[in-house]
Amino acid sequence: MKQILHIFVKDVRQFWGEIFLSVAITAAFVWYFPYQWTGADRMHAVMGNHLLVPYTAQFLGSILIYLVPGSWWLFVTRVVHSERLVGDRQFWLTRPYEWKNLLSAKLLFVLVFLYLPIFAAQCMLLAEAGFQPFSYIPGLLYSLFLLTVVIVLPIFALATVTSNFARMTLTLLAAVVGVLCLGSFSSRLLPRHPVVAGLPESAVFSYSILLCAGIAAVLIQYSRRKVWIARILVFGTPALFIMAAPVLARLSNDQALIDRHYPTLANQDAAPVKLSVFPFSPGEREFVTNMMQGEIFVHIPLKGTGVADGYAVIPDNVRFAFETPDGYQWVSPWQPSSTPTFLPIGSAGDSAIFMPRAVYDRLIGKPITVHLTLAVTQAKVSNVTRIPLSIHDFSVPDFGVCSPVSGFRTPIDEATGIVCRSALRQPPLTYIGVVWSNTSCSTPHTEPDPGVQGAGWAGSLDRAPAQFGISSVRQTNFQLSNGYPNYPSGNPRYLCPGSPVTFTQYDVFRRTQVALTIQGFQLAAVRNSWPSD
Amino acid sequence: MKSTIRTEHLSRTFGRTLAVAGVNLVVPEGAIYALVGANGAGKTTLIKLLMNIFRPTAGSAQILGVDSQRLAGRAFERIGYVSENQELPDGMTAGGMMDYFRAFYPTWDRALEKELVRQFDLPLGRKLKHLSRGMKMKASFASSLAYRPALIVLDEPFSGLDPLVRDELIECLLDRAPETTILLSSHDLAEIESFASHVGFLEQGNLLFSEEMSVLSERFREVTVTLPNPATLPANMPATWLQPQAADCVVRFVLNSYKQHTSEREIAELFPAARDITFDPMSLRSIFLAIARSNRSGATSAGNPVTSQEKEA
């Protein structure tokens, strides 16, 4: 312990400048980042008659969120390199340093001057956003864990396998370029693969692999200084990981993945949603196809009905099977679905899929039978909160803190939207309903204004205690429907103080597959423009 | 005699280059052992193998009874290492460095530290990065001697230093010599000769000989044979003759296995007409050059008829 403290004190004396810089940047981040939260209250409070003030503050906040990890990169690298592990001329190699003490001293330094300031910063941001920080200790610790895996450990591990700051910088740049190239190659190898929403296993697995590789590299360097083994771990593991994911996904059976997570129902009558083709008025819409990066993008408009009250059905992945009368069949791989969520009130939207050009050429002009299967998550209402809209920040239980949004020139009591912020992660999947006023809130009404319903989705089904981020506060922007009739020429509608806002939260109820067969389907000619709604 | 350093078939390769080739080295306790050799002979690599900075490809080494590959942490409390290429904590002042290192050594002698600082006239308040090369070396010496190490390892410690600084460092070393074992590598043969007790000659990674200075000095002689007529070299020259030359009436060579009566009689028998035969003692530098040149011209066993090293091993 004595040696640990001795090395620690030496590092503090040597790197007080870097420490000061990092702490100052973190403090400035805590000061300026809240200006990102563009609630009407805050904007009107800071703006006065000067538009420049909030914009400058917002700009600083958005820059500082990158400068904080930048300062970590500087001082973690410097402190590791003060007893660098690469080379054969360092003074400390022939001094009575115990490697465990040396590593502990460096970790103590990182704990005191990186983790404590960012922990304090995250607590202060939570408090500033209207949350009680001590209620979020597990989430804050999980957030620090994510920062460790994604930022701190990679920087630390890179520093242990490089000999000076310049090499470290070049290596970091090369690593970023390498990851981008590999990522691009990887995404070309497997452009789309099914995603199971709200399933933390894959993320935990990824984090575990990266964490183990980083820790192993650091331990090998400090205990044995086996530079090449450590370098292979530091650079090889992420590279292998990026490359292996699509290869394994391609080799694996995506049908088995879907069947495992979305078991088929024995009785389709019990399906959480009944699918049908959206009935177009002739000439209004058509089955549209577009070219995109050499593939054909096929849209099929769907309607979902029969969703039970208190539930919503979220299409996660989709698979199409096309059959022609001459026996040709093409079954698509499972792909993420962009179809909107189905609600009990009934909803419609496109289901779309990418198809190779060669397949399209075989199918065009023929009557086709389409078997469409959606892998869906059925979500159940877990909580409903009705709150009258306030002109100030208002707290929504289990969701976050919300604020009405108004333009700079708009009175504070005439909101044109709502923004919310949540602690450490996106809020649970929530359907937000509002009532728009057709006229300005300050206009005296001779007749009661029934208003217009508006709604939007916010949040996610992911239930991890925190999401990766420097800030502990997440801003949730959501688009409320019907806010701008006849956009862009028409006047906006307003959310008036006191009008009800409903937050309906959902939890995963079950996952399953629903199917639809369409007879006599014909592919349209390829268009270069996207369909308009 | 107890050995402070003992290696067995110690080897190290870098790619295809054999830097140290199966070296068997014994440094007796209390010795001032000079490791000499040309540039690239493998001296620094050998020392780094001993200090566990490099790991051997084959063979082993014991330093103060510890396997060199386990040499770490507290084992260095008894070893002082100074190298011409060693990086120091440049951001610290000389005094700061002494303060910092002091806590690592239970045997740190504050009185000795003060004496060394005074002896070297170290500017304690100046940052190491602002010190001259000689002053840095002095600071390095002071920080490596103040805890009275049982073994001092010096890799080219005098390289590039002015004579005054060299003398100061050597004087300081000699002051410590009675209580420690010193292993140093150097090109500076003249200075080593004045204080080394043992010498080892490294050539292309091979330890050609390793023995006490007195034995070495006794073994090598520069032989000059003056003949009445123009001389020619004998057809069957012994392998113990290095760099034989015949010019006019004189034959010259270096004899590497001189024994006073035997060698004089043998050579007199080989040159019965000789008018004069002289056996001149040689400096370490002359021995070093004779061996190096002989090796380069292909006489691989030039320096090694028998070594005290092998006797001990």
Image: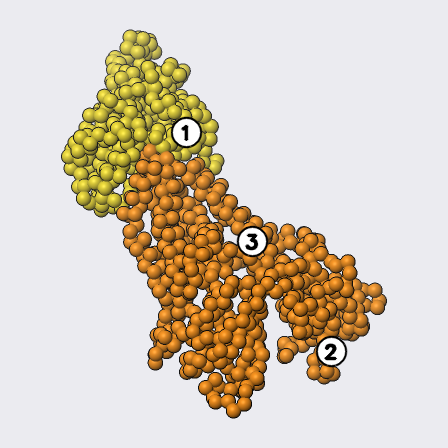
Chain colours: A orange, B yellow
Expressed as whole percent of the image width and height from the top left, the position of residue A362 reads 77, 68
Q: Quadrant of residue A364?
A: bottom right
Chain identity of mark 1: B
Expressed as whole percent of the image width and height from the top left, the position of residue A460 reads 56, 63
* SS at badge 1: helix
Disc sitting over residue A203 in the figure? 3
Chain identity of mark 2: A
Compare residues B69 and A432 and report the one nearer the observer. A432
Expressed as whole percent of the image width and height from the top left, the position of residue A123 reads 40, 58
Disc sitting over residue B70 in the figure? 1
What amino acid type should be assigned to the residue bearing mark 1?
Arg
Expressed as whole percent of the image width and height from the top left, the position of residue A486 reads 57, 85
Tags 3 and 2 both on a single chain: yes
CA separation, marks 1 and 2?
A: 80 Å
The residue at 60%/55% (across/down) is: A199
Mark nearer the N terminus (3 vs 2): 3
**Extreme residue toward the bottom, this view:** A446
* SS at badge 2: loop
Whether residues under marks 1 and 2 lie with C-beta atoms below 8 angstroms apart, the answer is no
The answer to whether residue B154 is above or below residue A365 is above
> Can residue A93 be seen?
no
What amino acid type should be assigned to the residue bearing mark 2?
Pro
The residue that mark 2 highlights is A279
